[in-house]
Image (cartoon, rainbow, N blue to C red):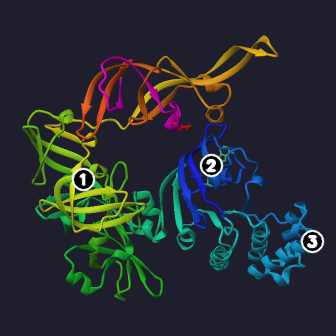
């Protein structure tokens, strides 16, 4: 049994195709993970890298505590099941299942016990003496599963195992693989392009597109909280409706106007607390997403709901228990063609409808999704990154949400009225502003604290839960931005320093004494030159650089050394720098240094001036190849 950890995994095929880009995930022991996405999104490549059938271009893959990047597939303790079951046609089912065990020279009686047990689990005991050609597709796939089970792998990898089966058998096998997973208590990683398969099988799902992970979450969360338009559209059938529209804040309400039609609805502002205020200006166009099942034609729903739009019905599909009604919210629209006004409604009101009817549809506003028109990211992220607040700075104090705090010396600025961009992770619980706790929600390993301060909403993201009714909040001032009149007045301290660097090989010639005689000893030291300074690197690091860049290109590539501002220190030797300023953030101090033409920031207790040396903590640095933006370490 084992965790599988993928850290900054990339795959670049020799022809230059970037099939997988910066894949990061910790798969826990016994999870059932599904990789899903359209054809060509990189799911199989990722699975094949885990299996060891494909080299990893950059990044680290761990199974349990072992780094397995360079381990042979047979040593990884995994088993893989493919779409084409690849059974030996001349062997019986029994022999097919036993084959791998025989190769491993297991005792006969043990092989027999394992084969019989696997056949029992899979319900193919009566076929053990048959040849594959005498069996159906579903039965053959069961044999392939049997062959994998008997190896008792730490991790089971399944690459579209059901796509050769007909719809009915697929549904049945889906359930059986689910049952098998709970019986075997092993980590399963399953690849499919079918979102229904993903939703019904996975404990967590990884949605991929163009080699990039779009979202990793439970089926329920993907459905309820899609992080972008792609995920929203990919999960759920029929697909979520996407309209275009603008949002205008009017007091405690927000008016949503749909484009290309007169339709408009009003929703309470409280639903949109997490949205950046610039979306609510009545001009920025966003995508408005609503699932067909969140729109109702039932007369009671229409009567009791303020968010109602008129729909011209074009056609319908009767599915028995419910009817899919197709229409358009533009009176001149065509409900057949996918457009910004086409609407699909899952109706179970039983209403009789015909083409051309104009009906009222109630939108469930609590389930409205909004996406940025350009980036397609959610406008209402589940964990918001920022609080967007009005502020006033006067006499060294900042006022926001009716509260006031003294600014630390390093972020003092002239008096102004402007906007405060306060990251949710910069709201701390060790301050002096008393705020009421509305809720504390665990979301993917962090806690989102919803607070009210001065009657308005404030969000904080914490690593620990809070169960108090009130808290005293403060601000990590090194993370804030203040703008006034379109100009930045206070900027956050960068969290990471970046140095251009090169990978080099140094030939070392040492004089050593062997048996009392002085001898020359030649060796090679790999390292990085950073702003004129040389730092030797561990063999393991050099190996990763060679793997990512190739032996020839490694020395020519332009690299970037990334180092957190608390992972670099003033030292006796290292990178030559000039200390230019000490930045005082109250409880913490940072040194602003000049290295070449760039500024570098260093956490420090002491005061420095003039020429100093800086030493990055090489245990905690990142190395990026600039051209392809590949994170090597
Ligand atoms: P999926 O499993 O999601 O359908 P793949 O992982 O098979 O996608 O492929 C991801 C991308 O990598 C695609 O663009 C595909 O064309 C490309 N690709 C896959 N295998 C190779 C290969 N051996 N050489 C070059 N490109 C490849």
Coordinates of residue 541 in the picture (x, y in percent)? 61, 34
Horizontal placement of 33 versus 155: left or right? left
Q: Quadrant of residue 248?
A: bottom left
The residue at label 1 has a CB less than 8 Å from ligand 1: no
Q: Nearer the viewer, residue 524 or 329?
A: 524
Task: Find the magenta span and give its range.
Answer: 599-628
Residue 134 seen anywhere in this rendered image of the structure: yes
User: Which quadrant is home to the C terminus?
Assistant: top right
User: Which quadrant is home to the N terminus?
Assistant: bottom right
N-terminal label among 3 and 1: 3
- Label 2, secondary structure: give it: strand
The residue shown at (65%, 23%) is 525
**Residues under labels 3 and 1: Cα distance?**
67 Å
Give the labeled residue for mark 3.
Answer: 108
Give the labeled residue for mark 1.
Answer: 430
**Residues under labels 1 and 2: Cα distance?**
38 Å
Give the labeled residue for mark 2.
Answer: 61
């Amino acid at each position: 049994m084992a965790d599988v950890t993928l850290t900054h995994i990339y795959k670049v095929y020799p022809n230059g195709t970037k099939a997988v880009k910066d894949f990061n995930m910790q798969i826990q022991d016994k999870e059932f993970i599904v990789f899903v996405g359209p054809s060509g999104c990189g799911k199989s490549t990722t699975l094949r890298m885990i299996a060891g059938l494909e080299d990893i271009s950059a990044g680290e893959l761990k199974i349990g505590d072992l780094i397995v990047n360079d381990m042979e597939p047979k040593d990884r303790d995994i088993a893989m099941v493919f779409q084409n079951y690849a059974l030996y046609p001349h062997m019986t089912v029994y022999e097919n299942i036993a084959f791998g065990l025989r190769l491993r020279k297991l005792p006969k009686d043990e092989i027999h016990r394992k084969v019989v047990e696997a056949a029992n689990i899979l319900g193919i005991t009566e076929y053990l003496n048959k040849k594959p050609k005498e069996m159906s597709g579903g039965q053959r796939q069961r044999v392939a599963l049997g062959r994998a089970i008997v190896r008792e792998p730490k991790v089971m990898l399944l690459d579209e195992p059901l796509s050769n089966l007909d719809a009915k058998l697929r549904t049945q096998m889906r359930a059986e693989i689910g049952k098998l997973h709970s019986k075997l208590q092993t980590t399963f990683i399953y690849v499919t392009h079918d979102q229904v398969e993903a939703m019904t099988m996975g404990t967590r799902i990884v949605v991929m597109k163009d080699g990039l992970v779009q979202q990793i979450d439970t089926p329920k969360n993907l459905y309820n909280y899609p992080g972008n338009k792609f995920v929203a559209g990919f999960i759920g059938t029929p697909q979520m409706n996407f309209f275009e529209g603008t949002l205008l804040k009017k007091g405690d309400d927000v008016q949503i106007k749909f484009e290309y039609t007169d339709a408009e609805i009003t929703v309470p502002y409280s639903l949109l607390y997490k949205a950046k205020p610039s979306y609510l200006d009545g001009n920025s166009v966003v995508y408005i997403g609503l699932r067909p099942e969140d729109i109702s034609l039932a007369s009671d729903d229409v009567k009791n709901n303020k968010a109602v739009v008129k729909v011209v019905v074009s056609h319908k599909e009767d599915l028995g228990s419910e009817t899919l009604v197709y229409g358009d919210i533009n009176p001149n629209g065509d409900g057949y063609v996918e457009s910004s006004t086409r609407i699909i409604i899952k109706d179970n009101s039983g209403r009789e409808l015909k083409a051309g009817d104009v009906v009222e549809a109630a939108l469930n506003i609590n389930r409205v999704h909004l996406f940025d028109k350009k980036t397609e990211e959610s406008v209402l992220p589940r964990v918001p990154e920022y609080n967007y607040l009005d502020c006033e700075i006067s006499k060294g104090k900042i006022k926001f949400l009716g509260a006031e705090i003294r600014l630390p010396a390093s972020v003092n600025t002239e008096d102004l009225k402007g906007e405060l961009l306060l990251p949710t992770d910069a709201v701390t619980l060790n301050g002096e502003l008393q705020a009421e706790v509305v809720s504390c929600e665990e979301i993917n390993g962090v806690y989102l604290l919803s607070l009210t301060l001065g009657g308005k909403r404030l969000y904080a993201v914490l690593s620990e839960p809070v169960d108090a009714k009130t808290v005293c909040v403060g601000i990590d001032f090194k993370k804030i931005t203040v703008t006034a009149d379109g100009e930045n007045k206070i900027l956050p301290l960068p969290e990471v320093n970046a140095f251009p660097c090169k990978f080099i090989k140094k030939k070392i010639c040492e004089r050593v004494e062997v048996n009392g005689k002085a001898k020359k000893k030649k060796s090679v030291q790999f390292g990085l030159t950073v702003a004129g300074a040389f730092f030797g690197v561990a063999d393991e690091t050099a190996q990763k650089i060679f793997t990512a860049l190739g032996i020839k290109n490694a020395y020519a590539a332009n690299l970037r050394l990334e180092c957190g501002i608390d992972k670099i220190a003033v030292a006796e030797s290292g990178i030559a720098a000039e200390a230019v300023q000490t930045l005082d953030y109250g409880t913490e101090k940072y040194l602003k240094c000049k290295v070449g033409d760039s500024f570098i920031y260093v956490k420090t207790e002491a005061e420095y001036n003039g020429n100093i040396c800086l030493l990055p903590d090489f245990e905690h640095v990142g190395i990026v190849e600039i051209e392809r933006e590949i994170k090597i370490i």
